[in-house]
Amino acid sequence: MRRAALCLLALPLFAQGLDETAFRGDPRRLAGTCADRARLLKPKDARMLAEYGRAFLVAGERAKAEECFQLARIESPRDADIHRLIAAAWLRSGQRLEALKAVADMQTADPKAKNAFTRSAVNLQDAGLAKEADALMERAWILDPSEWQNCVAYGRSCLRKARRDAAARWFARASQAKPQEERMWNAIALAFADHGAEPS
């Protein structure tokens, strides 16, 4: 009750913008402050809650982050991408065990979410967890071997990490899935041209 009353009192203050000097402070603190404002203005969107949690982790406010992650899971328990966002937030803050738990939760929440599995595999790869990334990507591919876009996205992430053999395997799978697809060949060409960097 007291917390709700404090939130109501804070709303008029949060309805105002800040001047530019307010945004020149410590980026970690600013992440937490802005996440607090966002959470008070729209607290029931699962994706946003997961993103607030990521900002709180950066700000060093783990308890608030965990609260946001839990609320996000309650709001959308079967949405694999929400669990992926939570895993990515843990990865970015160097919390590998928490990240791997969130990846496992994602697979349980929606065992057929091939696109979320692929995005999570890319996140794992970028965080240096190649073994876990490969295993998750294999699962995504088994669900739909004709999904060339996922194969290319993962191959691109392999190039970023200088895993040329792994990239070759995924590009070969993409080419076998749709050998007559112009966009697929172009996507692979750009992956090599960009040295695996995310497409612009």
Image (cartoon, grey):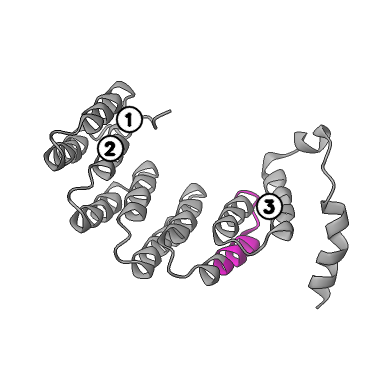
Please provide percent x and percent y for residue 88: 46, 51
Q: Residues within 10 Å of mark 3 (few under 14, many from 20)?
A: many
User: Mark 1 is on which residue type?
Assistant: Gly
Left or right: 199 with respect to 67? left
Q: Earlier in the sequence, mark 1 or mark 2?
A: 2
Q: Residue at x 35, y 44 (%)?
A: 128
Q: Residues within 10 Å of mark 2 (few under 14, many from 20)?
A: many
* Position of residue 75 in the picture relative to residue 98 (left or right): right
Disc 2 from disc 3: Cα separation: 33 Å
Query: Which of the two discs, 3 and 1, labels the residue nearer the N terminus?
Result: 3
Q: Is residue 70 magenta?
A: yes
Which quadrant of the structure image shows residue 83? bottom left
List the residue tagged with mark 1: 196
On the image, numbered disc 2 is attached to which residue? 158
Disc 1 + disc 2, Cβ < 8 Å: yes
Q: Residue at left 73%, top 57%?
A: 41
| Disc number placed over residue 142 in the picture, else none | none
Where is residue 47? Give x, y as percent. Answer: 54, 57
Most prominent secondary structure in the magenta stretch? helix
Residue type for callout 2: Cys
Marks 3/1: CA–CA distance: 32 Å
Three-letter amino acid code of the residue under disc 3: Ala
In the picture of the structure, the residue carrying the numbered disc 3 is 35
Residue 199 position, x and y percent, is 39, 30
